[in-house]
Amino acid sequence: MDSSLPRPITLLRSALLADGRLVDVAVTGDTVTDVAPAGTLRAPSATTLELDGRLLLTAPAEPHAHLDKALSADRIDPPLGDLGSAITAWAAYATTMSVDEIADRARKAALTLLAAGTTAVRTHVDVLSHGGTGTVAEAVRGALALVQVRDELAHLMDIELVALAGPLAPDAHVEAALDLGVDLVGGAPHLAEDPLADVDRLLAIAHRRGLGVDLHADESLDGPVTLDHYARAVRDWPRDRQYSAGHCVRLGTLGPDRLAEVVADVAAADIGVITLPITNLYLQGWQHPVSTPRGLTAIQALLDAGVRVAAGADNVRDPFNPVGRSDALETASLLVTAGHLTPDQAYAMVSDTARSVMGLPAAGPVVGARADLLAVAATSVTDAVANAPADRIVLSRGRLVARTEVHRTVAAPARARASVPGPATVPVP
């Protein structure tokens, strides 16, 4: 930790943009106010940051995290397996958690995201109802912890909270979490005995509270489809709230006619879809050892219909995903590999579109945009996604909030050893 951060920045000098231009970027408060050829803008040295040709991008946003679960795998030692086994392992551990333990893991996970460049996070938090038998105090432990972490980190990053209500969580428990300041209503209706009824129940809570909705939707390779029911229900709801759905794995297995129907409903309702390649590639397909399905939503069909498709990492080192680096460039790389997207499309889904789905103002090195920025030691977006350089500079609302510098030393090639005394140092900018 560096007590000198966050530090206001008014000028980023010699930044490489994705289009190849080398520029200076002026910042006033939290907003980009000028972009000009490199070497033409001036500002006090104390608030100037030399980028030395680093690639400057819109900072990533994480539209679907589980900070209350993050980094719990070592404590739980869960078996490797599918969604059902992960739910069972997590439910058993959740009975033992304290507010402080949840907050400690969540804080560490959030700061790891920030160090990697993510300046905004939407995180689901379980309503811990123990199958409907727990008390209100037990049910809101996660909400209490994440509200605390959100408040602690408010000067560094934007954190949105979603109440993740299981099918057996009583409405009173969901309402209690919302009363603590949780921002949106969420749940996993596809796990309910009557999935459509659970969609209606959760939407009724959101309607009463005047809140947006972010549901886990159809996280399976077969079974019911709830996404179109959700879309038709909110199609005429107020547009000053956000409506989104994560996972939507079932769309990737539908036939073309049924898929077209669901996608049309989603587009008409302007529901943002959040695909989660790391976790769903891990959780889905265990029952299919031959021709294992990819476990992703129908990304291209959604994009073709004009649906806002964002991407997130979902779980990180917990029973639902034993790995994960809390790095949006990891998510983008998997979108290229498993989703057949271009690197530019993939990076947009973890940055600009993610911010849109989260209801955040546009950001990036563009005049008038929020100065949430990531500078990496890369020559292009493709280079950044391919190599995920550890060398990074992170600005949130115009302030330097994280910096990682890498120094690499590599032995000289044999042919050069005769003329180069000792190891060669390969500088990383």
Image (tube, grey):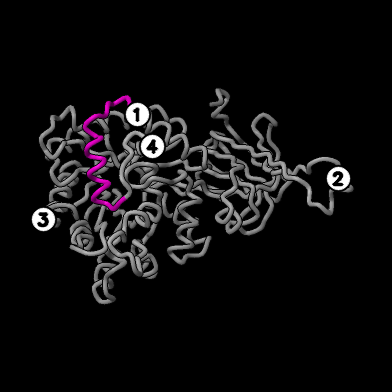
Q: CA distance from mark 2 to mark 1?
A: 52 Å
Percent x, y for residue 46? 67, 29
Depth order, front residue of 416/38:
416
Mark 1 closeness class: few <14, some 14–19, many ≥20 residues within 10 Å: many
Magenta span contains residue 83 = yes
Q: Find out whether the residues at labels 3 and 1 contact each other: C-beta distance under 8 Å.
A: no
- Identify the element where label 2 is drawn: loop
Sequence order check, earlier mark of 4 and 3: 4
Q: CA distance from mark 3 to mark 1?
A: 33 Å
Percent x, y for residue 86? 27, 46
Q: Is residue 245 left or right of residue 424?
A: left
Q: Amino acid at mark 3?
A: Asp
Residue sitting at x 27%, y 26%: 98
Dot 1 corresponds to which residue? 103
Mark toward the viewer: 2 or 3: 2
Sequence order check, earlier mark of 3 and 1: 1
Q: Is residue 298 left or right of residue 361?
A: left
Depth order, front residue of 409/170:
409
Magenta span contains residue 259 = no
Q: CA distance from mark 4 to mark 1?
A: 11 Å
Q: Which mark is residue 194?
A: 3
Q: Find out whether the residues at labels 4 and 1 contact each other: C-beta distance under 8 Å.
A: no
Percent x, y for residue 229? 18, 61
Sequence order check, earlier mark of 4 and 1: 4
Dot 2 corresponds to which residue? 420
Q: CA distance from mark 2 to mark 3?
A: 72 Å
- Identify the element where label 4 is drawn: loop
Q: Amino acid at mark 2?
A: Val
Q: Which mark is residue 71?
A: 4
Residue range of the region highlighted in magenta in the rendering: 81-101
Mark toward the viewer: 4 or 1: 4
